[in-house]
Image (tube, rainbow, N blue to C red):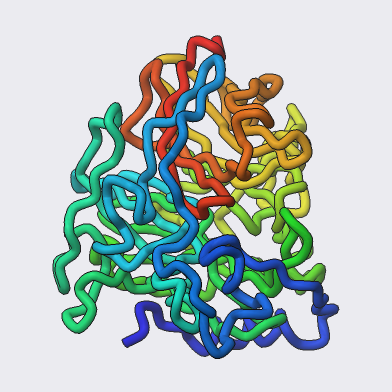
């Protein structure tokens, strides 16, 4: 059973993105799990087998990561984590770990491309998976409960015939150079409904670069058990505009990867970047009840006389490039918004602060420099249960291809 339905409209928009609109092709980079041998689209993916690869993947113990203000707490995922996700959920490697409050006493975590048994053909690759937890005491890490088939509050989405194997939640066509994968980039709960913003990746390129077909929002009314994409939320990324069609606008390329932040003024703010890790950050806002209606979004213009516009093409950079995967949240301790993201050119994880979502944003402060990010640390996502002096966030390490939890002292950002 497919976890998400693709309507005829969705299919039509996807067809638009892959037909005669300058679809580019590029070389495909392998993901790191399974020793870099079976990444989606790599020369080994879909081949005859893993050739004796360690079934549990490349992850090792997490050596302490420490800078002047930030330190690692522990692995969240992987066979070496306290959660033993290989044995309990069939996860040897995964990344992202986008965390959000589900509004009912749990935190949900969305992950990107995920691998299981590395010794079998394809490495049991899934485009994305979901974990759940009620653990908000983060000082000793994040604990994920067992999964149970049909239980919408259990540790993951599993079936009765595979109760220790986390299912994929958002499907993909799985066609190289058309739609290689679908990867979550942001999520939020509104009035008991879960909203997951994801990107449809057409193809992988050089490190930190990829091409997307579109971004879109999938919704779940059963705590992440099943998801449905709303075709009217698709932002096509093909450099074309159809007047009067909000889904097809050249400027929608600015919102292919996203981050949500609840404003203190009742608005929901959506920060967006182009596909890849080298673009700037843009900003939109919408009333929470209208999150699925692209015609109700307003965009930050930077103009004092008209600071918001209903036209996405009027949006301006609120943070200069390069901005990679990011997260934004209001912090009670600082009484400011905090933004975390990776600076791909510096090989660092940085933070900025602002009193308003549209800025001005402070200069970046380094949380982890190149010396602390050996192995490739990326994708910092603020945990919703931390708003005090100690800010907790998840991040991924490429060499182990798994997600860790880190803690930073925000006094460094004052």
The answer to whether 252 is drawn above or below residue 304 in the figure is below
Percent position of residue 130, x then y: 35, 61
The answer to whether 378 is drawn above or below residue 131 in the figure is above
Q: Quadrant of the C terminus?
A: top right
Work out whether residue 248 can be spotted.
no
Instruction: Return the residue nearer the eye: 206 or 14.
Output: 206
Residue drawn at point x = 41 percent, y = 69 percent? 55
Percent position of residue 134, x then y: 20, 44
Left or right: where does residue 85 sit relative to residue 63? left
Q: Quadrant of residue 304?
A: top right
Left or right: where does residue 105 sit relative to residue 26? left
Instruction: Return the residue nearer the eye: 88 or 330.
Output: 88
Q: Residue furthest right?
A: 22
Left or right: where does residue 155 sit relative to residue 38? left
Percent position of residue 331, x then y: 43, 23
Instruction: Return the residue nearer the eye: 373 or 326.
Output: 373
Residue drawn at point x = 57 percent, y = 51 percent? 399
Work out whether residue 411 can be spotted.
yes
Percent position of residue 264, x then y: 43, 29
Left or right: where does residue 253 sit relative to residue 71? right
Q: Residue furthest front?
A: 52
Q: Quadrant of residue 348?
A: top right
The answer to whether 108 is drawn above or below residue 412 in the figure is below
Residue drawn at point x = 27 percent, y = 31 percent? 140
Circle count: 0
Residue drawn at point x = 31 percent, y = 87 percent? 1
């Amino acid at each position: 059973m497919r976890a998400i339905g693709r309507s005829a409209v969705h299919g039509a928009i996807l067809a638009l993105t892959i037909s005669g609109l300058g679809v580019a092709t590029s070389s495909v980079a392998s993901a790191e799990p399974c020793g870099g041998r079976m990444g989606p689209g790599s020369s080994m993916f879909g081949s005859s087998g893993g050739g004796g690869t360690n079934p549990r993947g490349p992850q090792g113990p997490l050596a302490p990561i420490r800078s002047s203000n930030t330190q690692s707490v522990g692995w969240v995922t992987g066979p070496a984590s306290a959660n033993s996700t290989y044995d309990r959920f069939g996860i040897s490697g995964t990344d992202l770990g986008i965390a959000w409050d589900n509004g009912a006493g749990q935190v949900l975590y969305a992950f990107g491309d995920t691998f299981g048994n590395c010794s079998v053909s394809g490495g049991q690759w899934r485009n994305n998976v979901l974990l759940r937890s009620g653990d908000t005491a983060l000082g000793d890490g994040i604990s994920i409960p067992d999964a149970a088939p049909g239980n919408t509050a259990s540790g993951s989405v599993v079936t009765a015939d595979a109760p220790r194997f986390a299912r994929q939640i958002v499907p993909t066509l799985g066609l190289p150079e058309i739609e290689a994968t679908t990867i979550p980039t942001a999520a939020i709960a509104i009035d008991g409904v879960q909203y997951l913003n994801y990107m449809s990746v057409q193809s992988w390129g050089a490190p930190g670069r990829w091409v997307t077909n579109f971004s879109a929002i999938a919704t779940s009314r059963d705590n992440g058990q099943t998801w449905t994409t709303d075709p009217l939320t698709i932002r096509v990324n093909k450099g074309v505009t159809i007047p009067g069609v909000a889904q097809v606008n050249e400027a929608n390329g600015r919102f292919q990867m996203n981050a949500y932040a609840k404003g203190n003024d009742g608005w929901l703010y959506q920060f967006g970047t182009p596909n890849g890790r080298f673009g700037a950050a843009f900003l939109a806002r919408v009333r929470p009840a209208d999150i699925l209606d692209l015609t109700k979004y307003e965009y930050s213009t930077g103009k004092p006389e008209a600071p918001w516009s209903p036209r996405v093409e009027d949006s301006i950079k609120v943070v200069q490039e390069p901005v990679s995967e990011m997260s934004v949240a209001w912090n009670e301790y600082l009484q400011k918004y905090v933004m975390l993201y990776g600076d791909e050119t510096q090989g660092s994880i940085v933070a900025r602060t602002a009193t308003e979502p549209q800025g001005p944003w402070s200069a970046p402060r380094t949380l982890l420099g190149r010396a602390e990010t050996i192995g490739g640390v990326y994708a910092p996502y603020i945990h919703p249960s931390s708003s005090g002096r100690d800010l907790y966030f998840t991040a991924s390490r490429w060499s182990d291809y798994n997600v860790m939890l880190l803690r930073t002292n925000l006094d460094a950002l004052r």
